[in-house]
């Protein structure tokens, strides 16, 4: 196998979600490199419907974490969880968001996508935009791995998009999808995958 193929498969195989980070800053140039890699993802009609907001300011991160924890508390209270359970989950969310040296908010926008008059095609177009943004996210995760950085996809913004939008004063068409946390790894987690046969059918 050619060397670059082995390198690519190695990066894909060895990437893990990293949730603990060293107290070492991530240089802006590295953040720009992983973002540039993200934008080379394929996208529907090549409309590039991804948008990114980079948050590496402690005070802003804390404001965001407070507001998102409050939103989580409200959701969990509505679910009927006990105050202890609510507090445990809310403080875990706060910790995840404040301990990462950099948070990259991945958004999708429908601004440049096609508009349809019927719900079926509108839904398909929205799905294509979201799929495109997710591919950009995966590029970003792999580029981070290539840089030796740790990263983790965090779905929380999807559950409180208005809170995220308000705290970050995002443009109206930016729809928050996920945070990708970024930093120098301080853990080496292990993960397994289900056997290929359990997920793949070769059809004849
Ligand atoms: C759509 C999506 C949402 C995720 N949300 C979270 C999350 O909110 N918090 C978290 O710690 N990890 C989250 N993850 C990371 C997964 O837990 C992780 O990818 C999975 O356990 C496999 O581990 P690996 O990435 O190390 O291979 C998410 C991943 C994806 C793709």
Image (cartoon, rainbow, N blue to C red):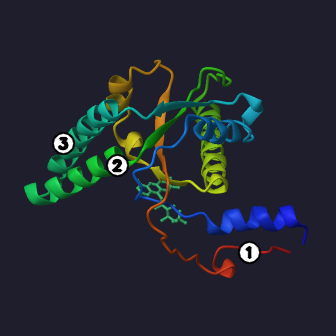
Q: Quadrant of residue 186?
A: bottom left
* Of marks 2 and 3, the one in the foreground: 2
Residue at mark 3: C-beta within 8 A of ligand 1: no
Element on which disc 3 rests: helix
- 166 and 22: which is toward the camera: 22
Out of 196 and 121, give the one closest to the viewer.
196
Q: What is the C-alpha distance between the residues marked 2 and 3?
A: 23 Å
**Residue at image coords 60%, 56%:** 148
Numbered circle sitting on residue 201: 1
Q: Earlier in the sequence, mark 1 or mark 3?
A: 3
Q: Position of residue 167 (x, y in %)?
A: 32, 26
Which is more foreground, mark 1 or mark 3?
Answer: 3
Residue 166 x/y as whole percent: 33, 23
- What SS does tag 2 mark? helix
The residue lying toward the viewer, choosing from 94 and 24, is 24
Asked if residue 112 lies left or right of residue 185, the reply is right
Front-most of residues 191 and 27: 27
The residue at the point 64 percent across, 42 percent down is 34
Name the image quarter holding the C terminus.
bottom right
Q: CA distance from mark 1 to mark 3?
A: 43 Å
Q: Any mark on residue 74, and which?
A: 3
Instruction: Judge from the rendering whether residue 20 lies leftward or rightward of residue 150; answer left or right.
Output: left
Distance from disc 1 to disc 2, alpha carbons, whole Å, reads 41 Å
- Camera-near label (1 vs 2) is 2
Q: Looking at the image, is mark 2 or mark 3 earlier in the sequence?
A: 3
Q: Is mark 2 within 8 Å of ligand 1?
A: no
Disc 2 target residue: 99
């Amino acid at each position: 196998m050619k060397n670059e193929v082995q390198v690519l498969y190695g990066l894909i195989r060895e990437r893990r979600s990293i949730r603990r980070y060293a107290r070492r800053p991530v240089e802006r140039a590295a953040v720009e490199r992983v973002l540039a890699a993200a934008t080379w993802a394929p996208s529907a009609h090549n409309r590039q419907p991804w948008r990114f907001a980079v948050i590496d300011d402690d005070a802003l991160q804390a404001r965001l974490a407070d507001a998102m924890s409050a939103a989580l508390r409200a959701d969990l209270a509505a679910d009927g969880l006990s105050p202890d359970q609510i507090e445990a989950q809310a403080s875990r969310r706060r910790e995840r968001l404040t301990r990462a040296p950099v948070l990259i908010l991945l958004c999708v926008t429908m601004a440049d996508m096609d508009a349809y008059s019927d719900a079926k095609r509108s839904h398909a177009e929205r799905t294509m935009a979201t799929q495109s943004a997710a591919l950009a996210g995966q590029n970003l995760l792999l580029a981070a791995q290539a840089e030796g950085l740790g990263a983790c996809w965090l779905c929380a913004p999807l559950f409180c998009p208005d809170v995220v939008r308000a705290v970050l004063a995002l443009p109206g068409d930016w729809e928050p999808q996920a945070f990708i946390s970024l930093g120098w790894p301080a853990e080496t987690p292990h993960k397994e995958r289900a056997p290929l046969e359990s997920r793949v059918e070769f059809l004849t």
